[in-house]
Image (tube, rainbow, N blue to C red):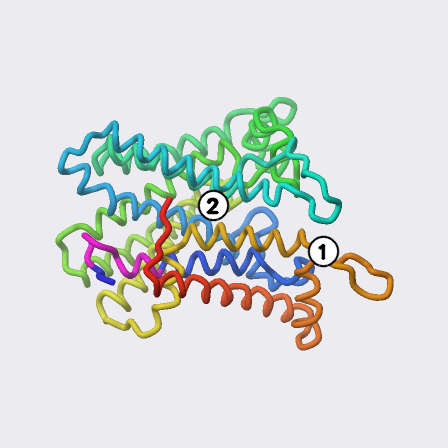
Amino acid sequence: MSSKLENRILSLDIFRGLTIAAMILVNNPGTWATIYPPLEHAKWNGCTPTDLIFPFFLFIVGVAITISLTKRKERGDNQNQLILQIIRRGFTIFMLGILLAAFPFFDLTNFHFIDLSSLRIPGVLQRIGIVYIIASIIFLKANIRWQAIVGVSLLVIYWFLMMFIPVPGVGYANLEPATNLAAYIDNIILHGHMWASTKVWDPEGLLSTIPAISTAICGMMLGHWLRSKNEPITKVVWIFVFGNLALLLGWLWSLNFPLNKSIWTSSYVLYTAGLALHVFGMCYWLVDIKGYKKWITPFVVYGTNAITVYVLSGLVGRLLVQIKLPVGSLGELVSLKGIIYDHLFVPFFSPINASLAYALTYVLFWLGIMWIFYKKGIFLKV
């Protein structure tokens, strides 16, 4: 696979593959009761390695926007047609998220259709679809200077809204889970259709999508830099420089507006963008500059079918929980996942390592499936 910008950036596929593999890993433990702390989200404020995965993917979306749309923008392709294509693709990604939320539609244990009246509307793919549409239109309609201005402005506007717009009955500058402005707005517009674990706030809610757009714009800025005529070593040096600058600015802003994935704070955008620059910079240095490529194939396999493997692994993961079989003399119904976990992992590992071993096996299973896709040249795009 070529690493030239006019085809694909190999290090971007690797970064995407790393991110998707990590996403599948943290989403599929053997049991949610025993998980290593780095594989869990922060309870509220703070940032664990798991909290980096989603912003990394949106950052990659931003890089891909610049790489894929620049030539079409420069050669004067019909923008209205481009925007229609963008909206169609973003809507498809959004609806795949709705499909995941609704699946499997039918209760295989009690044999009735699942009640979808409280179907969760926000979600990971839903946010990706929305951010992709808005960030792509910003890219088409604005030059690099105005793209940067919009990205910074969205962060400042979001900070102002969250800190200075009072929530009725609560006041202003309230960043607690159920009483912040983002949760208040979500409760008005999405009441009954939010994350089932809380029902009163959603980590992919409406207002917090505003700074998520800036995460993608950060990636767009990196895309511009990669397309520049500078030498590769110059590019990678400045990638690390700006990564450190973003980390510093994010940390400083966090003193007033804490790092928080659930409400996607502005400090969190800068902090995670800084780390994304470091991870991508390392991939770029190792692969595109030093030429170390023997280790990359598993991540390229994941990265070239990222949305496909995310959706398929999610659908199968839900089926493994939904399908239940009678076990023991009493015929107690146990999920297929529970049977696999209890018989193939629990007897051989400590509880926390059994949970991790199941997750790693699930990642390897999907690597095998996607390897077949890769070898056969099957790359499913939305």
Residue 26, quarter of picture: bottom right
Whether residue 42 is visible here, answered yes or no, is yes
Q: Position of residue 150 (x, y in %)?
A: 31, 33
Residue receiving disc 1: 324
List the single residue furthest toward the bottom: 348
**Observer-nearest of 19 and 51:** 19
Residue 11, quarter of picture: bottom left
Q: Of marks 1 and 2, which one's residue comes earlier in the chain? A: 2
Tell me what residue is drawn at x 28 percent, y 68 percent. Answer: 286
Residue 220, quarter of picture: top left
Q: Pick the quarter of the image with the N terminus.
A: bottom left
Residue receiving disc 2: 254
Q: Position of residue 156 (x, y in %)?
A: 39, 33
Magenta segment boundaries in residue numbering: 4-14
Left or right, 107 with reference to 304: right
Label 2, residues with CA under 10 Å away: few <14, some 14-19, many ≥20: many
Label 1, residues with CA under 10 Å away: few <14, some 14-19, many ≥20: some
Name the secondary structure under disc 1.
Answer: strand
Whether residue 256 is visible here, answered yes or no, is no
Left or right, 272 with reference to 81: right
List the single residue furthest toward the top: 168
Query: Which one is closest to the eye, mark 1 or mark 2?
Result: 1
Q: In the rendering, which numbered label is found on residue 62? A: none
Please name the amino acid that badge 2 sits on.
Ser
Q: What distance separates the C-alpha of mark 1 from that of mark 2?
A: 46 Å
**Observer-nearest of 376 and 284:** 376
Q: Position of residue 232 (x, y in %)?
A: 18, 61
Name the secondary structure under disc 2.
Answer: helix
Tell me what residue is drawn at x 49 percent, y 67 percent. Answer: 364
Please name the amino acid that badge 1 sits on.
Lys
